[in-house]
Every structure is written in C-alpha cells, then in structure tokens.
Amino acid sequence: MKPWLLLLSLLYLAPPAWGVEFLVTGEFQGEIRPCGCSKAGERGGIERLSSYFKTKGPKGWLWLDLGNFAVEPTDQGELKNDLFYKLYRQHRLFAMLPGPREFAMGKRGIAKRRLPFLLTNHQGELAYTERIKHKEGWQFFGFLSPELLSLGVHKTDLLEGVGAFLARAKTLRSKEWRGVLLFRGNPKELELIQGSGLFEVILPANQAKSEETQQLEFELAQQKFFSPPLQGQGVLELNPESQGAGRVAWLGPQTPLDPTWAKDFAQYDKKVETLFLSSLASQAKLGDKRVYKGTGYCVNCHQAQGEAFEQSKHAHAFDSLEKAGRAHDPDCIVCHTQGYNKGGFLSTELTPNLVHLGCENCHGLAPEGHEKDLEYKKNRKPVTQLVCKGCHYGSHDPRFSFETAYPKIKH
C-alpha cells in the first residue's frame, strides 16, 4: 500500500477528536407545552426547546434523550406524539433510550415513528433500534431494566438483565473509543454497571414521580451522576470529559417561543376541539346519566358557605380556560370543571351547572337525602392536602402550600 493511502486509511478508522457537549433530555411525559396555570411553572414545552437548540448553533453538541416522551395512543395522544416526532427529527436527535411509555405503544408503535432508538439489552430485533452507536470518539449504549416492563406475575422476555447486558457490552466495547451509557433502572443495577468499568459516562433517567421528589444530581459509590428535569422543563448540559461539569439550562419565560411552531400548535388545538365536539355527540346518544349534581344543589341548604365559595377563584375556574383558548382541551378541562369523565361535566351547553369547580370537587358526591344520613355526615370526604394535590401539583402549581392555601378557601 502506498504511504499516503495508509495514512488516509488510518485517519478514516481512528476515532475523531473529543470535545463535543452532550445535551440530555428525557421524561417529557407528553408535556408538549406548559399548562399556563402558574407563572412559577411556566417552563419547558416544544416551542421553547426548539428555540433553545437554535441558539446552540448547528455544531459542537449531541442531543441524547432518555425516553418516556410518548402518550398513550388515544386520538389526542397521537397528535402529541406527532409533535414530538417532528421536534426530534427537526433538531437531529442522535439517540433515544426507549422507556416504558414507548414500549406501552407496542412494537408497532415503536416502528411507526423512525426515531434513533438505542437499546443494547433487547432480545431479538426491534425496528429502527440499534444496540450501539458511534460518534465523536464515543461509543453509545442503552440499558432499560426488565423490571420496568414487568407487571405482577408477567415478566418481560424482551429485555436482558444486567449480567447478560454487561457480557454483551464487553464484547462490543472498543479500546479505541470511550463508552457512554443511557440508563433507566434501579440503584442496584446502576451500581453493578458502574463497577464494571465499561463506561466513562453514565446518564441515568429521572424516574421521580413528581417534581418535588426529583434528584437532578446524586452520588453513588463516590461517583456523581446527573439527570435531566421532568417534563422537558430544562436541558442537562454535560461536558463528557468530566461528569462533574453538568448543569441544567432551565427553559423558563426567558427562553422565547420558536414562532415556527405557531402553525403546528394552532392545528393541534383545532384538531383537539374537533375530537372533543365529536365525543360529545357520541355521549349524547347514551343519554344523561350524570352523577354530579352541581353547586346549585348544595347551596339550597348551605347558603352561607355557597356565598363565601362564590368569591373564590375555584368558582370561576373555567373562565381562565376560555381566556387561554383551552376550553375544549380535555387535559385542562379535568381540573377546571366538576366531574369531567366521571359522570359530570360534558360541555358548557349540555351541563352548564357543572362549569367551574364546585362543592363536589373537594367534598365528594352529594347523594340524595344525605341531610338525613348520619353515616354520610360521619364519613364525609375531608378536604386534605391530597385532595388539593389532585390539581395543584408539579408545574400546575409548583409553589402550592396546603397550609397557606386552605385558610383562603375555608368556608
């Protein structure tokens, strides 16, 4: 071989220079945009994330996602999934670890959208899913714990455990490249994988159930780990040369909305309204089987309490939806009406007595003749923090305090 050809072949086979920044997201949980109920929770959303990527420029970073973006495949859920799919494609997502939400769509659901799924410990073949990827001097692997796809006595046969995963990863690892792992599993699995020494960088998914309990930074066996925030409210920016150099770029009001998405969201809102109105037509055929009676029924006797309640924001909760143009969005209606999808609110026209919040939202259903029912009085649903947290949770109201809020509505 001629010397110049030998040099060229060596340059081609050698891994590229290090220095790329990892931009890590995950756990969007179907949140395509902030709900708008709280200024303090005004973070994240597709429009802000798109704007963020545009400010980063086209080079010098890799976008990695730890999964769980998908929504259950209802008609509205599929509209959301399509918006995420466009976002991932538009901003060159490099790799995604599919999470339980993606697997909940089934193999057909995963195959429906050609995303760069990365999963090393799957058994058999998955459409558009790679076991290993290479880029910028790094080898990328993905591990999803079999526990997360196992329910009760039903155990998954789709995924390998830690032992088989490490054996497979060891055969795939190259000394020429450094290893990165996208991880979703329990602390014991993480500790075993960390102890293998196969990966210079491990990126664990944020698996907290709420924003109040999430850990964006933690230590395990004297190693520091970083996770991106829930619901896409920020991006983890990580210098892979040092896991101690991670930070979260929060996507708050200071991050502008990308105007190129305005048309997409206008179309989404219109389609959601069409779905909502068509569902009303089908429910009308079933007849009226409302179990919620509405505030008017209660204030016939509880007049003083009713007058006090009328002065609260709860009594006018639906007004904010109409002002925001979300009066036909089921995701929002559920916390701004009485008994939506539970034998209560249908629409402002069909059930005007169940618009806004009412007595039964907090105190439970009021059965006929309950004023003479001593057992009902004894067992009446108390207004507790848990009741309030049904709506006042996470980004909907991140600064909510039951101790502060309850005295303001007590009547």
Image (spheres, rainbow, N blue to C red):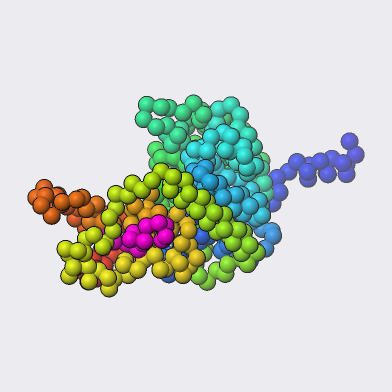
Provide residue 284's location: percent of width, then percent of height: 43, 48
Residue at x 34% of width, y 59% of height: 354
Question: Horizontal and vertical percent for residue 102?
Answer: 52, 41
Q: Quadrant of the N terminus?
A: top right
**Residue 202 among those drawn in magenta:** no
| Residue at 52%, 38% in the rendered image | 105
- For the C terminus, give its image quadrant: bottom left
Q: Is residue 372 above or below residue 402?
A: above
Question: Residue 56 occupies which quadrant of the picture?
Answer: bottom right
Instruction: Name the residue at 17% across, 70% down.
Output: 304
Above or below for 264 versus 176 = below
Q: Is residue 120 visible?
A: no
Which quadrant of the figure has residue 52? Answer: bottom right
State the residue in front, 247 or 70: 70
Single out the residue that lies furthest toward the right.
Answer: 2
* Residue at position x 67%, y 46% in the image: 135
Residue 17 or residue 94, whichever sits in front: 94
The magenta region covers 347-359
Q: Point out residue 352 in the picture as x, y percentages from the top left corner.
A: 36, 61
